Image (cartoon, rainbow, N blue to C red):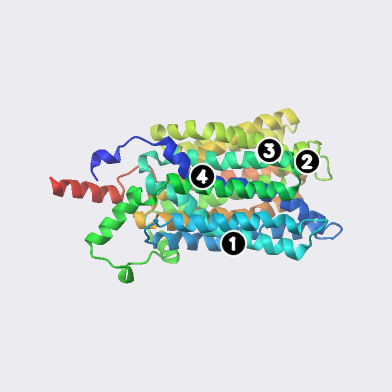
Amino acid sequence: MTENKSEEKFDIKHTFFIGLAFFTTGISWSLYNTRVNQQLDNYFAGFVLAGLAVGILMALDNMLGVIIQPIMGTVSDNTRSKYGRRIPYIIVGVICSAIFFALIPTGFLPTGNLPILLIWMLFFSLSMGFYRSQAVALMPDFVKPQHRSKANAIINIMGGIGAIVAYTMGLVSGVLGLQLIFIIASIIMVVALLVLVLTVNENDAYSYKLLLETEAKEGKVKEKKEKVGLVNSFKDILNEEDKSTLFILLAIFAWFIGYQGLEAFFSIYAASGPNGVLNQTDAFASFMFNFVAIPFIIAAFPLSLLASRIGRKKCIQIGLIIMILSMLIGFLIQTLTVTMIILVLFGIGWAFVNVNSIVIVWELAPNIKKIGTYTGLYYFFSVLAAIIGPGIVGGLRDLFGPGSLLLDGLLFFVVAFIFIYFVKRGEVELTDEEKIARKKAIEEL
């Protein structure tokens, strides 16, 4: 491996195939979040604390994910196999997730029962947590640091396409039935996995090859290999003199509280119910968050190119400013037209933020061994925010009234902006693997 190779051209097609792993999470979670919550609401109809019960059960996946995903990221970092260190877990995870996802509707009313639904929800959530960190960590194993913002944009676009496919399938569920819709989604997941396995050979990943070469050169054997620990990694982050890693994780935590809270309550805010503000039909209120999703997909890749010119941190700051201003305008002028416009702006701002945040986390990882571990830390903070975000934002809405929702979410984007100010590193730097490659090239000369 030479210096010239580190400047190789970005392979969009190959990154698209890598993104198929994240695509499987996009299609399944989107259908899960828009259909399972309705079924749970039917089961708990008439209960005094029905909303609380549904909210807790819908947070089950995040509760499990906050534990499982960081662990599995670390486990994959320490895995060495002829199939790679991420792909084996992705294969098992996608297949199991697809099976349990297809079974979920057997617990739906009127023919199913709540215990059956909860069992399939549990196993589906466990299966998704088993491979999600690896689905994301696979990309930086292949893509050089200077291209990771662009690659992460494609990964997020793949997840967004999965969501759009799920929403589109939801429109025809009345004709085909929910059971068939879930089965079709499961088949799509398996087909995407098959294409991934046939087109992506993890043994070709530059970081994995370099890691194996380095360990072989140092004479390491599997039994004596130094283990990468999640807890120890977090302790190291707390003890770092430069707190950039800690502050980016706190910023991620803050903006995901705001985002998850808004996503959880926006359809209620837009509807005509007792907590509604915009007085739209339930169907259109549920559809309206597409005004965030579609601009995000359109803007993600072009904005990732901007990161290489002005820096990732600055892109995130611009995105947060756009999101804060759009939410403020939406709070001050609560009309349908203005809300649709500010949602589009919000989606563009979210693209600025989301395509660069995990890339900064990867750049702050001390070496290639810890890419999966740091991916796990990213998901620990984002999933923890997903668990508590709806409750916090919902509590603020209860305190200040339904019309305060956009302002309630805005507060956490302001907090995130403060945290991101203290992030001093995370731009494209000469990473450990490139330092090793450079040293090797000098020695060969």
Q: Amino acid at mark 4?
A: Leu
Q: Nearer the viewer, residue 6 or 183?
A: 183
Label 1 Cα crowd, 10 Å radius (few <14 / some 14-19 / many 20+): many
Mark 2 or mark 4, which is nearer to you? 2
Percent x, y of residue 213 = 26, 56
Mark 4 or mark 1, which is nearer to you? 4
Q: Are marks 2 and 4 in contact (CB under 8 Å)?
A: no
Q: Amino acid at mark 2?
A: Val
Q: Residue 366 appears in which quarter of the rendering?
A: bottom left
Instruction: Identify the disc placed on residue 126.
Output: 1
Left or right relative to 51: residue 351:
left
Which element carries disc 3, helix, strand or loop?
helix
Instruction: Identify the disc placed on residue 175.
Output: 2
Percent x, y of residue 75 = 44, 63
Residue at mark 4: 20
Whole-Å distance between the Cαs marked 4 and 1? 20 Å
Left or right relative to 91: residue 37:
right
Q: Are marks 3 and 2 in contact (CB under 8 Å)?
A: no
Whole-Å distance between the Cαs marked 1 and 3? 26 Å
Mark 3 or mark 2, which is nearer to you? 2
